[in-house]
Amino acid sequence: MSLYLFILILLSVIHIYLFLYVKCEYILNINIIVVVFELLY
């Protein structure tokens, strides 16, 4: 159970990190957002 929680927290941290990274890149280049949305959907 603790392993599951650890993985869940790890994925959450990675997701937040990627979100912030993409948000910063968005200011420089909007193509990054398009690529991310294509990967998500």
Image: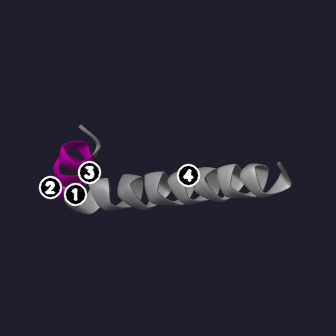
Rounded to the nearest whole Å, what is the CA distance between mark 1 and mark 3? 6 Å
CB contact under 8 Å: marks 1 and 2: yes
Query: Could you tell me residue 35's position as x and y percent?
Result: 18, 53
Question: What secondary structure is marked by label 3?
Answer: helix
Q: Residues within 10 Å of mark 2 (few under 14, many from 20)?
A: few
Query: Which residue in the protein does label 4 denote?
Result: 16
Residue at the image position 48 percent from the left and 55 percent from the top: 20
Residue type highlighted by circle 3: Val
Query: Which residue in the protein does label 1 denote?
Result: 32
Question: What secondary structure is marked by label 4?
Answer: helix
CB contact under 8 Å: marks 4 and 3: no
Rendered image: mark on residue 36? 3
For the residue pair 29 and 13, the one nearer the viewer reads as 13
Quadrant in the rendering for residue 38? top left
Rounded to the nearest whole Å, what is the CA distance between mark 1 and mark 4? 16 Å
Q: For the C terminus, give its image quadrant.
A: top left
Query: Which residue in the protein does label 2 denote?
Result: 31
Q: Which residues are magenta?
A: 30-39
